[in-house]
Amino acid sequence: AQTVTQSQPEMSVQEAETVTLSCTYDTSENNYYLFWYKQPPSRQMILVIRQEAYKQQNATENRFSVNFQKAAKSFSLKISDSQLGDTAMYFCASTTSGTYKYIFGTGTRLKVLA
Amino acid sequence: KAGVTQTPRYLIKTRGQQVTLSCSPISGHRSVSWYQQTPGQGLQFLFEYFSETQRNKGNFPGRFSGRQFSNSRSEMNVSTLELGDSALYLCASSLAGGAGLPQETQYFGPGTRLLVL
């Protein structure tokens, strides 16, 4: 069964600094996808970044990038130049092609300090 | 284009009652997924529907059920409510629900907060 683990319940970072959120997963499948979602205090969940497991290149979206270590089953999110608007709960998630089911981690609450 | 909408936004029920939550996906989206979010358990997958068919379901008791209509709108029902059912229920829609295409992204609604007393 797929599992997703986020071991950091809470983190904080100073504005303009860089922070890395950790995520590990476990799956026996080869065709899977990994995601980071952001849930601000307003509660609307939005996609931050996605990574296809078959791609070796790490995904990047503006200030957000991932460090995908397939052998170690690790998928961390790096936020550069942190902004106050990055304050949110961040969820790591995975899905396997054809299952139509996403598995989420328990989340990391990130607070960006002014 | 309007986003995913969920109604009602807040609900208070008592143990033993039943509740129905509604989700309207983004226009053109045919896949709807439901999640239960609690502080201790995070987001847990309930079920996914596509073209009125349930394609997958999570590990929840039979008290939790859902359906999807021909216009892709979806409802979930919880019968015989228990205190532990208090949670934020999130709905997410996507074009077809498959993860293989880069544009196949799940868009979430604001959620329905259910409190069971």
Image: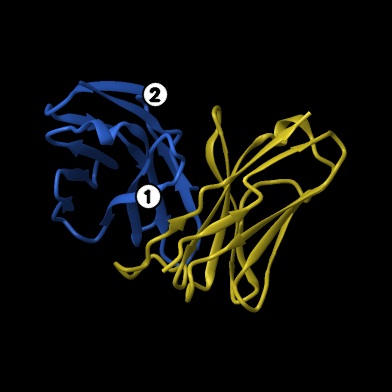
Disc 1 and disc 2: Cα gap in Å? 19 Å
**Where is residue B80 shown, x and y percent of the image?**
85, 42
Q: Pointer 1: what residue?
A: A46
Element class at badge 1: strand
**Where is residue A74 shown, x and y percent of the image?**
27, 40
Please tell me how crowded label 2 is: few (under 14), some (14-19), or many (20+) other residues with Cα within 10 Å: few
**Where is residue B76 shown, x and y percent of the image?**
70, 56
Q: Is residue B18 left or right of residue A7?
A: right
Which circle, 1 or 2, is nearer the viewer? Answer: 1
Q: In the rendered structure, which amino acid carries the disc numbered 1? A: Ile
Q: Is residue A57 left or right of residue A75?
A: left
Q: For mark 2, name the chain.
A: A
Chain A tint in image: blue
Residue B75 versus residue B110: which sits nearer the camera?
B110
Q: In the rendered structure, which amino acid carries the disc numbered 2? A: Pro
Q: For mark 1, name the chain.
A: A
Residue farthest to the front, as pictured: B2
Please tell me how crowded label 1 is: few (under 14), some (14-19), or many (20+) other residues with Cα within 10 Å: some
